């Protein structure tokens, strides 16, 4: 654990100085500032922000995580010639990426909120939920990116798979669900819809925020089913639990494969 | 120091190393020589734990090399180093010190010889390939390791830096350190090593001193002797295939 923290300390120094990370921070800073300035009331800002967060965070985490892992190939070899366990290095590198992306995102959305938003208990809770969803998605998609990079030695192939992974969860998955719902609308679909939401981390994150905002019109079918089945509080807890599982699954698989991999 | 017995490594159907039995002893400078793709790097990577062996035993000071603690005794100089772009060399060394938990004095001789002190605070991204290689060499010697593993150590170094590095290798070897190196430069090997392991197609075909290899077929220098041995083995393979 101590060595993981040491690795994170130095990797963060490296990653936080990268131009990509600074651009990522500026993107959220300008976007959130613009929304607060022009979109009107705070809940509309949060919904607009949510729509961007659900698309951009998985995309950037996938791409940045994959590029970072491939670009660190020689550095990984060098570090593993030191007295460092493979699991320690893998965990340290992944946490460094996930933490640095999360920090950029949080600073990017929080500064404009504190300057221009209405800071009250109700708003703060929704805003915190949006921030938490963003962080969870960062951890999920960066661990998936690491898994893709570990399983594919070819950089171009790994990069392509990472993009497809994002495309699948951000776009294609919902299309398949919609198509299935229309095709089987004579059958009771509540339970399959519920399972489908938990099978897509982006959907779980969306439901998590919308349950709090209590805007059933925007929740879509699965959100409404979620609310009906679990109510708001239990729904939020289940969504969070599913997101945590989504972090653990690719991380543990990637770690296991990395430990046995020929480097 | 390192004892390898019956080592095999397969990458799928490809046999990268077969039945390797070799010992690397304290006080020796062993050069691993062979054509491209003969298994030199695989053997080094297996010793470092970077590639997993298919079967066989590898013992460091009598103990199997499971875990990572034995690597605190090793200084490794990879062929093509690549460090985090936005760190500088001073931070890199600080990180290694921190991870190794070393409190005692470091061997900074190469940093002084290579005149690296002016480069230590520059981002690694802005350093030339040669300077990165010098830092790479300096780091390998930094923690006074008992075993040095040097992969093409003089490649990308200018003649003066290369001679400083070779002097340093000989000096540390004289102080009792074991050295394993690979190089395509036979003049470097002739100058440095007292022991040669010749690998081809994943098997050891010759083990002995440079003089023994040269005397084998009456060659005057090591480069000719190694080329002669390769040709002999290639011709042998061709006639077997025909």
Image (cartoon, coloured by chain):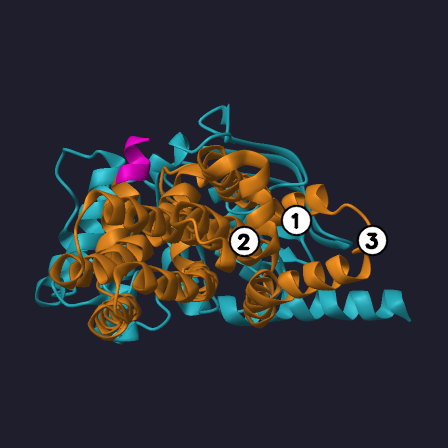
**A70 falls in the magenta region:** no
| Mark-to-mark CA distance, 2 and 1 | 9 Å
Q: Which residue is mark 3?
A: A186
Tags 3 and 2 in contact by the CB under 8 Å rule?
A: no
Q: Same chain for marks 2 and 1?
A: yes
Q: Quadrant of the C terminus of chain B?
A: bottom right
Relative depth, front residue between A3 and A185: A185
Dot 2: chain letter: A
Q: Earlier in the sequence, mark 3 or mark 2?
A: 3
CA gap between label 3 and label 2 equals: 24 Å
Q: CA distance from mark 1 to mark 3?
A: 18 Å
- Quadrant housing residue A249: top right
- The residue that disc 1 covers is A196
Indicate the quadrant where residue B212 lies: bottom right
Q: Are marks 2 and 1 in contact (CB under 8 Å)?
A: yes
Chain B shade in the render: cyan
Which quadrant would the N terminus of chain B be assigned to in this image? top left
Residue occupying image coordinates x 86% and y 69%: B239
Q: Are marks 1 and 3 in contact (CB under 8 Å)?
A: no
Nearer to me, A101 or B49: A101
Q: Is residue A4 magenta?
A: yes
Q: Residues within 10 Å of mark 2 (few under 14, many from 20)?
A: many
**What span is in magenta?**
A1-5
Q: Main secondary structure of the magenta part?
A: helix
Residue that carries the numbered disc 2 in the rendered image: A203
Q: Position of residue A44 (x, y in %)?
A: 33, 64
- In terms of sequence position, does the residue under pointer 1 or pointer 3 come before the other? 3
Residue A189 seen by the camera = yes
């Amino acid at each position: 654990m101590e060595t993981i923290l040491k690795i994170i300390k130095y990797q963060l120094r490296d990653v936080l100085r990268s131009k990509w990370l600074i651009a990522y921070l500026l993107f959220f800073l300008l976007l959130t500032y613009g929304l607060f300035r022009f979109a009107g009331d705070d809940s509309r800002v949060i919904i607009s922000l949510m729509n961007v967060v659900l698309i951009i965070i998985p995309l950037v985490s996938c791409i940045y995580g994959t590029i970072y892992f491939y670009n660190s190939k020689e550095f990984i070899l060098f570090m593993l010639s030191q007295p460092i366990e493979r699991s320690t290095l893998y965990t340290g590198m992944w946490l460094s990426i996930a933490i640095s992306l999360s920090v950029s995102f949080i600073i990017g959305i929080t500064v404009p909120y504190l300057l221009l938003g209405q800071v009250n208990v109700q708003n703060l809770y929704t805003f915190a939920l949006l921030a938490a969803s963003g962080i969870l998605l960062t951890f999920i998609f960066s661990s998936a990116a690491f898994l893709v990079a570990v399983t594919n030695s070819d950089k171009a192939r790994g990069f392509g798979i990472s993009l497809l992974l994002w495309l699948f969860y951000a776009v294609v998955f919902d299309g398949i669900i919609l198509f299935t719902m229309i095709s089987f609308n004579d059958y009771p679909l509540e339970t399959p819809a519920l399972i489908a939401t938990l099978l897509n981390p982006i959907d779980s994150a969306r439901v998590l925020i919308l349950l709090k905002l209590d805007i059933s019109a925007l929740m879509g079918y699965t959100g409404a089913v979620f609310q009906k089945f679990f109510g708001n509080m239990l729904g939020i807890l289940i969504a969070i639990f599913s997101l945590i599982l989504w972090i653990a699954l690719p991380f543990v698989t990637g770690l296991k494969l990395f430990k046995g991999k020929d480097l | 120091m390192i004892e390898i017995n019956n080592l095999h490594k397969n990458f799928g159907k490809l046999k990268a190393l077969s039945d390797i039995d070799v010992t690397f002893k304290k006080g020796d400078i062993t050069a691993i020589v062979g054509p491209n793709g003969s298994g030199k790097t695989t053997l080094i990577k297996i010793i470092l734990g970077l590639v997993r062996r298919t079967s066989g035993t590898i013992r460091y000071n009598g103990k199997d090399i499971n875990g990572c603690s034995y690597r605190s005794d090793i200084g490794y100089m990879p062929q093509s180093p690549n460090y985090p772009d936005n760190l500088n060399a001073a931070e890199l060394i600080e990180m290694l010190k921190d991870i190794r938990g070393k409190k005692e004095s470091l061997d900074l001789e190469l940093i002084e010889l290579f005149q690296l002190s002016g480069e230590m605070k520059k981002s690694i991204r802005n350093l030339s390939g040669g300077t990165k290689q010098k830092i790479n060499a300096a780091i390998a010697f930094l923690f006074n390791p008992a075993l040095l593993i040097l992969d093409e150590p003089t490649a990308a170094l200018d003649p003066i830096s290369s001679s400083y590095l070779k002097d340093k290798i000989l000096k540390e070897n004289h102080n009792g350190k074991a050295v394993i190196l690979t190089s395509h430069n036979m003049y470097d090997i002739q100058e440095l090593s007292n022991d040669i392991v010749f690998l081809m197609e994943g098997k050891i075909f010759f083990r002995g001193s440079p003089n023994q290899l040269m005397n084998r077929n009456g060659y005057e220098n090591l480069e000719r002797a190694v080329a002669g041995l390769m040709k002999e083995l290639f011709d042998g393979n061709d006639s077997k295939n025909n």
